[in-house]
Image (cartoon, helix red, strand yellow):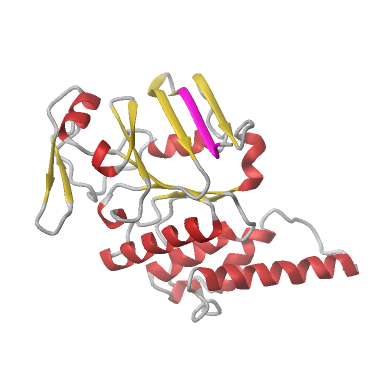
Amino acid sequence: MSVVELRDAAVRLGGRLVFSGVDLNVQTGEFLAVLGPNGAGKSTLMRAILGLVPLAAGRATVFGGTPARARGWIGYLPQRSGFDRATRLRGVDLVRLGVDGTRWGVPLPVSAVARERRRSERDRVDRVIEMVGAAAYAHRPVGELSGGEQQRLLIAQALVRTPQLLILDEPLDSLDLPNQVAVAALIRRIATDEQIAVMLVAHDVNPLLGYLDRVVYLGGGHALTGSVDEVITAPKLTALYGSPVEVLRTRDDRLVVVGLPEAPHHHGHRHDEEP
């Protein structure tokens, strides 16, 4: 069974067609990046897979059912810019929110079964913190941590409920290049070791090169899917946008995409928020 399957999918927002005719198939253990310029609909595609945005046409299934029914198997990390330095919440408590965040009300007397469940949850929190390499600083306030350390803890929070699909919206944003590469390597290891499908939204493919299985490149209201070398080429992107696009590879093996309709665009340049 495919983890995510889209067939001829289309989304409209406010009467505007964001994309149409999108076909996608994501398998267990696969690490896939969703790329494209601002406004192409990368985050909208993620929200459609989460069942938060309805399709205007086509079909979407997640774990063989509707996206809304599959949310319990999905770990989701939305885009964020980091924590204020005054934030005193400890890293371990931030991760625990992934377990406790949906619980409300005054705690009731704890039964033996509940105590065992809580022990199991504590063990799970400890395990995912160890998994992302954050044990050394998990008991420090998150406001005191670096952007890379905060991002590792947020990934742990998304993992704590043992998802089978991990959706990460711009997790590399605002990190320096060494931290971007380190987080990309971490996500690759998690996808492989835990057999979790990962879909990661990014503006810059370069820190991800060498770790990805496939990419989805959105643009011109459509999508291309394949390996980096198959998709990010001048002929493919020119056809996608209907105007000349150049793809250059620098001496240090980084990709530069020039001539996208909105403006000359280098992977990694930060634009305004997209739909």
Which residue is rendered at x = 18% and y = 48% of the image? Answer: 255
Is 7 included in the stretch rendered in magenta? Answer: yes
Q: Quadrant of residue 44?
A: top left
Which residue shows up at 22% across the image and 47% down it?
267
For the record, the magenta segment spans 2-8
Judge whether 7 appears above or below 125 on screen. above
Q: Is residue 250 above or below residue 8?
A: below
Q: Is residue 94 magenta?
A: no
Name which quarter of the figure residue 247 lies in: top left
Q: Farthest residue to the left: give it.
A: 251
For the question of whether residue 109 can be seen, the reply is: no
Which x, y percent locates residue 194?
55, 58
Front-most of 231 and 59? 231
The x and y percentages for residue 89 are 56, 71
The x, y position of residue 176, in whole percent, is: 28, 65
In this orientation, does residue 239 appear? yes
Q: Main secondary structure of the magenta part?
A: strand
**Which residue is at the front of the view, 185 or 86?**
185
Q: Residue furthest bottom?
A: 136
Quadrant (top left, top right, bottom left, bottom right) of the N terminus = top right
Q: Residue at x 11, y 44 (%)?
A: 248
Q: Is residue 171 left or right of residue 176?
A: right
Q: Position of residue 179 (x, y in %)?
A: 33, 67
Q: Looking at the picture, does residue 60 appear above or below residue 233?
A: above
- Relative placement, left or right, of 213 versus 168 is left
Residue 129 lies, with reference to residue 248, above or below; the image says: below
